[in-house]
Image (spheres, grey):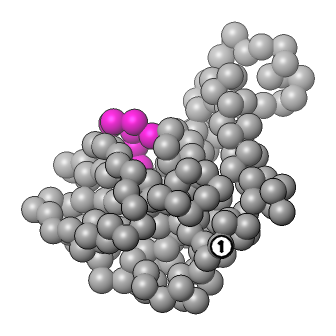
Amino acid sequence: MIGRTFYKPLREEVRYFIDTKFEKQYVVADTMKIEEPLPQSENRGVLAKAFNIKPVEILTPQDPNFSIVIPKIGANSRVLGNVEAGDEKVYLDALNKGVAHAAGTAFPGEGGHVFLFAHSTDYFWNVGTYNAVFYLLYKLEKNDEVDLFYNGQRHVYRVIGTEVVDPSQVQYLTRKTNREFLTLQTCWPLGTTLKRLLVFAVREAE
């Protein structure tokens, strides 16, 4: 049971550690064209070469109709739109397939509050069965990039802060804003459902 609960978080932690150790970069591809890979560094270590660790990996959104890509943590997932956050059966089913967009919140490009969530569960021993894409959200810092792809368009957001809250604090779901605002939610601490970690970002001016 312990292995099932913590396998995915541990796997993501190990991957992030290796990526950081070897200075791996993730580059977000535009939906209209694939960007050219960045030139490889001549200073790559012997170990990196031995394990064939690519210094640069291009992240192409899984679904140009609605996806999220976070280059710092190598996250890339489709987003399921209009998921009822208050209906456990509905949102747990959605989280098996990707990241959920909370019904009633804005879509990218609409100028409102976009709310996305992943890694939620009914009981702590089921944590490992759900999408792992948000396990590393706590690594995000101010000005880190978050990309949302919606209807073939790319929308770039920058992180402005984070907060840990109780599950009962649902006011963040319905917050009002005078600019396009993005909230990402996941469970916290890793492998539990005790709290919620929220990451806040605002859309870059085009």
| Residue occupying the far right of the picture | 50
Q: Please name the predominant secondary structure of the magenta segment in the image.
A: loop
Residue 4 seen in this snapshot: yes
Pick the front one: 86 or 18:
86
Residue 186 placement (x, y as % from top left): 50, 60
Residue 62 placement (x, y as % from top left): 59, 65
Number of numbered discs:
1
Q: Residue at x 71, y 70 (%)?
A: 126
User: Crowding at label 1, few (<14), some or many (≥20) Cα neighbours within 10 Å?
Assistant: few
Relative to 57, does residue 130 appear above or below in the rendering? below
Q: Amino acid at mark 1?
A: Tyr
In the picture of the structure, the residue carrying the numbered disc 1 is 123
| Residue occupying the far left of the picture | 178
Q: Residue at x 78, y 53 (%)?
A: 7
170 to the left or right of 167: left
Residue 205 placement (x, y as % from top left): 19, 49
Q: Quadrant of residue 55?
A: top right
Secondary structure at numbered mark 1? loop
| The magenta segment | 140-146
Relative to 199, does residue 79 appear above or below in the rendering? below
Relative to 153, does residue 7 appear above or below in the rendering? above
Residue 64 seen in this snapshot: no
Pick the front one: 52 or 138:
138
Give the position of the N terminus as an image quadrant. Answer: bottom right
162 to the left or right of 119: left
Q: Residue at x 68, y 40 (%)?
A: 13
Pick the front one: 58 or 182:
182
Q: Quadrant of residue 168?
A: bottom left
Residue 45 magenta-highlighted = no
167 to the left or right of 107: right
Residue 199 placement (x, y as % from top left): 38, 51
Q: Residue at x 61, y 58 (%)?
A: 192
